[in-house]
Image (tube, grey):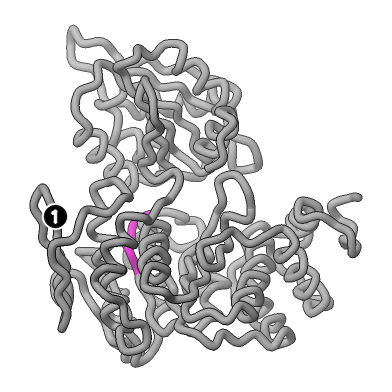
Amino acid sequence: MSPHTKPDAAATLSQWLAYLESLHPKTIDLGLGRVRQVAARLGLTLDCVKIVVGGTNGKGSTCAMLEAILLAAGFKVGLYTSPHLIDFNERIRVNGELASDAALVAQFQAVESARGDVSLTYFEFTTLAALRLFAGAGLDAVVLEVGLGGRLDAVNIVDADCAIVTSVDLDHMDWLGDTREKIGYEKAHIYRPGRPAICADPVPPQSLLDHAAAIGADLWLFGRDYNYSGDRQQWGYGGRNQRRAALAYPALRGANQLLNASAALAALEALRDRLPVPQQAVRQGLSQATLPGRFQILPGQPTVILDVGHNPHAAAVLAQNLDNMGFHPYTHAVFGMLSDKDIAGVVAKLGSRIDNWYCAGLPGPRGGPGEALAGQVRAALPNTAPGADAPLVSAYADPGQAYAAARARAGENDRIVVFGSFLTVAAVLQSLGRKS
């Protein structure tokens, strides 16, 4: 079957996904007109509590914690995230289980029938399929991760009962603007009048504050309306009217996870009349939440760290997490990054911590050869002090080859960090024969 041919009744999920990739002339085409039109034809309504999560970094972690806590509290929960690492089904979960191929194909058929001559992007089409699946699943709550930005993202057709902006930093600048103020304006549009609007960024852009005030959102600011405190053993959350003390640290590792966890708890405090969550469910959920590729450490030696971070803000957090790990003689970086990202900004945050760079080519129009990436890494690295060894920078066709080279060179007490893109982490996971 050609990817451009409309799938028949026997088409598989992979055939459908290939078709969806060919449907629209642009991969990214922001705007809510098309997706709202098809949602209306489908008669889409979600009769449950709707939590929408946007932000530059931390969205996935916050969504994972919300899902785990709500499931531990006994609620029926739908989770929609993007992108996926290995299988598309990772994007859509019902009660903690991945949506089946059959369930997804049924939703794709319904969206295809309803759209008529309306052209939808891959993300718009799959978002409508996820929402329709959730609408028929008898859920208490859905947690929806924004794909890109906020104002014009397909997820924003949903009127959130509570919206969270995790962080505002520079990424996707071709689409969202080249300053934090412009990006903050885009992200703030997931907020709704009179409803809880959580902002976990400790220094929110004025544009976000202004938009929340202009629409009359109930803005919860980190440091003003809620906060966290902690010592080496445990931590606590303090909100407007609720305190949660003696919490174990989240299973998700990393420097920013308390910021993400406290934003999730602020949302649950704001929604507690509709979704009451006992303390034990918070403890259990935080201990069980997992998210592949977010400072994920694989078992064995040498230590292998997987991190999908792909902008300077995420790279700074990765650097902090690496610093907190203890001593390793050498650090090897398997690095693959899309060409439209701030490669120099990412390298600058990590340069002094990496002894060997293995630069991997990535596929697609936004990818590029490993040689070109290696050239950018060399140009961005800080000057080496006199007498010190300069980091080694080498190039490879793809992340699998780069990872094999790193494994061959690394001693058992060294560490290998795989980062720069979802594509990079996914390719290494696949080369290891792992599911995420």
Q: Amino acid at mark 1?
A: Gln
Residue 57: in sight, yes or no?
A: no
Farthest top residue in view: 387
Residue 145: in sight, yes or no?
A: yes
Figure check: 102 above or below 225: above
x 89%, y 50%: residue = 2
Main SS type for the magenta part?
A: loop
Q: Which of 344 and 74 lies nearest the eye of the viewer?
A: 74
Q: Quadrant of residue 332?
A: top left
- In the rendered picture of this protein, how many numbered marks are placed on residues? 1
Q: Which of 366 and 334 lies nearest the eye of the viewer?
A: 334
Question: Badge 1, how many Cα within 10 Å: few under 14, some, many 20+?
Answer: few
Q: Quadrant of residue 128?
A: bottom right
Q: Is residue 15 magenta?
A: no
Image coords of residue 257 (percent x, y): 27, 54
x 28%, y 86%: residue = 218
Identify the magenta region: 165-170
Secondary structure found at label 1:
loop
Q: Which of 231 and 122 lies nearest the eye of the viewer?
A: 231
Q: Is residue 131 left or right of residue 208?
A: right
Image coords of residue 141 (percent x, y): 47, 78
Figure check: 181 above or below 409: below
Q: Which of 210 and 433 lies nearest the eye of the viewer?
A: 433
x 84%, y 52%: residue = 3
Image coords of residue 246 (percent x, y): 13, 62
Residue marked by disc 1: 234
Image coords of residue 157 (percent x, y): 56, 80
x 36%, y 73%: residue = 73
Q: Quadrant of residue 345?
A: top left
